[in-house]
Amino acid sequence: MTDAIPGRGQYTEDARGQRLNWLRARSDTALASLERTGLDAHNLVGNVENFIGSVEVPVGLAGPLLFVGDAARGSLVAPLATTEGALVASASRGARAVTESGGVTTKVLSQRMTRAPAFEFDDIATAVRFTGWLREQRGRLDEQVRAVSRHTRLVDVDPHQIGRRLHVRFVFETADAAGQNMTTAATWQICRWLTDRLATEDELRPRGLLLEGNLSGDKKVTAGSMLAGRGTRVTAECRLRRDVVARVLKSTPEAMVKSHTATVLGAQQAGMVGYGVNAANIVAALFVATGQDVACVHESGVSLFSLETDGDDLVGTLLLPNLVVGTVGGGTALPHQRDLLTALGCAGAGGVRRFAEIVAGFALALDLSTMAAVVSGQFAQAHQRLGRARRVDWLEAGDLGAALLQPVLAQGLDDPRLHVTGVRPGRRLRGQGIASELGALSERRKLTGLHPVTVTWRPGEGSPRTVDLVAKVKSRGEEIVAGIAMLFSLCGPELARAWDRWGADTEFRDAHRRELAVYRRTEGVLTDLLPRCYGLLEDDEREAYVVLMERLPDDSGPWTGERVDTTLRAVAGVHGHWLGRDQELLTEGWLYRVPEPAYLAKARELWEGLVRHAAAELPDLLDSARTEIMLGIVEDAGYWTQELHAVPRTLVHNDLNPRNIAVRDGRPVVFDWELATVDVPQRDVVELLAFTLGPEVTAAEVDRFLAVHAEAVAAVSPRAAALVAGCDWHRGYRLALREFLMTRLALYAAGHSQRAFDFLPRVTETAFRLWELARERDGE
């Protein structure tokens, strides 16, 4: 057979390489991600056949969750292997609520594993006689089990006759193993003994035998397993205080119970086995992380979740009747999975009860958090915003090849005869942008983010070229807005409603079109500041918005005063070119929708909600004094925003911080222009100083940076010089600082409660230092 898989059955690295190369040739795919693996082929006997590589699944830590259980005790974190955004955050939110209320009580009730062979007899009467005889053999059946495994114990023999067929449900205890293989071997030993024992007994001998007649419910959801148990039967319970429900889950006990009652009625109407909320997410994530049998998620995720009030408290209970888990055997011996089981204190013999309780405790925490999100009315709003009436042929990773990039490069380089001869993945970048992450929260089915590629092409004239590029595949602005909505749905109904009302009018709307429009501009002051653009793709049918740009050198050097000066002078060219031409910019329309000047004051509900949520969740970041300052800025927005918009305005980057700045040939390069808008030029100065300076900055340093910027803006043209001379540059800076604190810093702070921003503590310290210096200058 010419198409046979090479190296079949060989557990060696050479055999793996042969199989991988065979698949490459067969699929015409590079499969570069499978080239390396952390697994040793020699150690995979019994885990996989025809091994070619491994697939990485990101693992996030949920918790900590306080356990006061039987086998699980203390403050524990759970490693969740998942690609579902917000799962870890939601489980952590539930864990926080449970922990602050005293913890979760957990208990393993039983452990059972079943196998159910089916016997066929000549007639009904023979099947009845066999059933009676089988009951008399119980002691001998135990002997057969002991002959196979010293860890397996037969605890029940449960016959079910259907006509001349008899299904016998053998029930075992399997210690710390999940037990499917143990019970199969023990049941097969019993069946062999039965057929040998009855070889000459015509009145009892079965005429046919199936080792599994499907009565056991293996890897299936069944009512029988839920009632009788299959796997580990484990329960968890917690008592949440009213104030914790309000502060952490953003709900009330009464609202939670009322909504839970409605979901139970819906489950009954649907004929659902169980009536849980989200336990399968925790089961699947912990199964993948710890080497459990993933095919058992189907039955293991069945749950019974209940809520009730007891006085002022909310009592939550969860039962997992069919949790098929083990801490020995199978995938639990693989190195990564073994490490995570060890971190949980569950690896090896004696760990299965603790592990089962951990699963149940975190499943209850997630159910509580998810139910609270449903109660808030925000659970599905992001999906409602993104509802599509048509099927979209979205970009996928495999699309970043010659067929897609050739027309993009040919147009971008104005060379219709250009021919792309090779595209391969480039060196991995350090990270993705925040906008890409937010967009992916709401729409994960399409390719987005930064994708390095090495492209070789033959131009119409000249020698072939090989260039390292980055394809920036953008999320739609609506997807970014919806991603933020999903994040804020975990922050409570008040903030979620405020974002629903005002979020669509923020600078995130039309972000995908705006950045492409920036790269189409031909003004030298702008193109000198941008990365070199090799081409653009804007395809509304595929919702594909791609900037193909140069790969800039990684730059993590220190931000000295000289470097800040250089960056301010560079961006001042853009500021000076468009200064006072804001109406011209808006009329041209290439910035798309820009929030109207009155929006800052109108959206007070949103800014206040952001501040109050961050203050409640992150008191170390926003203490009472800082909270009072920010709320005061929000309250006075109707006044100072009018003065702000009287200051000359221009094109601003609106996200000018070190994440979006690189250096090429000693000159700053500024990228990620999706939030570009019309504002005072000092807006970019405020953000750059907040991100690059430290909380020890002095008034003299701030004054010097402002002078550098003002001089550079004025130097662009006589018109710019007259506008700079005609306004109070420092006052414009202080008004822009108010805007930054009220909008961008408040947005970061609220998001930080669900998705940590490492840079935020230092930026917050510096921003409030800048505020203190500004107040001193104003004599306040």
Image (spheres, rainbow, N blue to C red):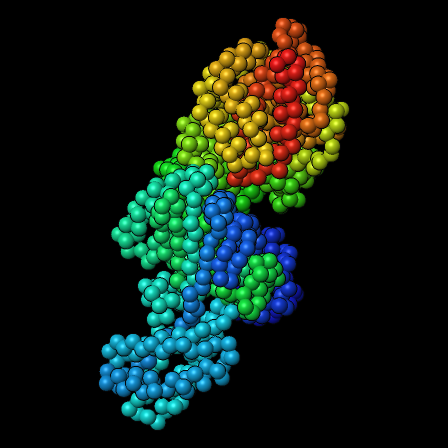
Q: Nearer the viewer, residue 754 or 198?
A: 754
72 above or below 509? Answer: below
Tell me where residue 162 sits by quadrant.
Answer: bottom left
- Residue 298 appears at what percent x and percent y? 41, 59
Tell me where residue 659 sits by quadrant.
Answer: top right
- Residue 15 appears at what percent x and percent y? 63, 66
Asked if residue 637 lies left or right of residue 222, the reply is: right
Residue 71 in view:
yes
Say which residue appears at 42% left-offset and 32% top-offset: 494
Say which residue appears at 64% left-offset and 12% top-offset: 779
Q: Nearer the viewer, residue 741 or 393?
A: 741
Say which residue appears at 64% left-offset and 44% top-offset: 428
54 above or below 439? Answer: below
User: In the displayed image of the protein, which residue is found farthest to the front?
Assistant: 311
Q: Nearer the viewer, residue 438 or 400?
A: 438
Q: Nearer the viewer, residue 123 or 372?
A: 372
User: In the displayed image of the protein, which residue is found farthest to the bottom?
Assistant: 200
Point out the image quarter for the C terminus: top right
- Residue 251 appears at what percent x and percent y? 40, 39
